[in-house]
Image: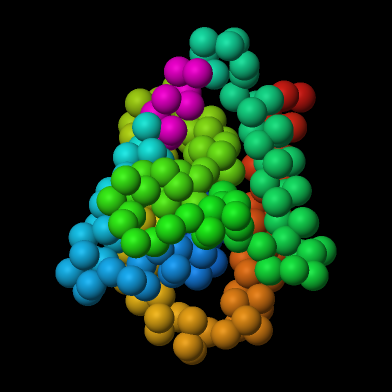
Amino acid sequence: MPVPLHSFLHLLFIGIIALFPVVNPIGSALIISPYLSRLSESRKKNAVRKITMYAFFICIISLFAGHWILELFGISIPVIQVAGGILICKMGWVSLSSDQQQGSDQEKEDTKISTADISDQLFYPLTFPITTGAGTISVLFTLSAHSADKNWETYLINTSAIILAIIIMCALVFFFYSHTKTIIQKLGANGQNIANRIFAFLIFCVGLEIAVTGVKAIFH
């Protein structure tokens, strides 16, 4: 396999695995279900479309602003790789060791807000922090540092992979948010718990790999 293609697929996989637990489209869909349950089908589709669009822009801005923020504070990329990798490992470990199902980037109390009219709630709290919150932004900062490269071509390949991962996550958000009733009926609590544990293990491994890469760069 050509090196650019291998690098692209590798970062695409890392991006999806790292973003899935923090965006958590399945768990988030269950959280926002009360907001959407009282809407007509057309209004629900429109609301989901706007949430997906807002989430995409938050992710893209976080991805591209991350590099400039690091330069502003004078933080080196290997340090961010180590710190971000440890943070991602911690997220995976907490999910693995917890006996309770946990959503990422959302606060349970947000579901108490009235669902009668959600037009002024599509960005906050439905998009931020329920769909994309501080955890998502932190992961994107880490991925931004992980994809940085002095070679312009390599940087474009790496960034393209992460953008594609963001698009895939937004597509999952749109799909699961549009089918909240079906998810609740078919997945069930046990199925959601199994899926969360599998992805928790994968996110722990991805975080460990990013941290090790940073450590190697520091000592090199």
Residue visible at 64% across and 52% down in the picture: 206
In the picture as drawn, the residue positioned furthest to the bottom comes out as 186
Instruction: List x then y, in percent, for residue 176.
Output: 39, 70
For the N terminus, which image quadrant? Answer: bottom left
At x 54%, y 53%, the residue is 110
Q: Is residue 76 left or right of residue 116?
A: right
Judge from the rendering whether residue 44 lies leftward or rightward of residue 217; answer left or right. Answer: left
* Quarter of image, res 33: bottom left
133 over 148 or under it: above or below: below
Q: Position of residue 108 (x, y in %)?
A: 61, 57
Residue 158: % across, % down? 41, 40
Does residue 26 show up? no
Magenta region: 62-69
10 vs 69, nearest the viewer:
69
Q: Nearer the viewer, residue 62 or 160?
A: 62
Asked whether, in this view, residue 73 is left or right of residue 8, the answer is right
Residue 183 is covered by the magenta coloring: no
Indicate whether 216 appears above or below 10: above
Q: Residue at x 45, y 80 (%)?
A: 183
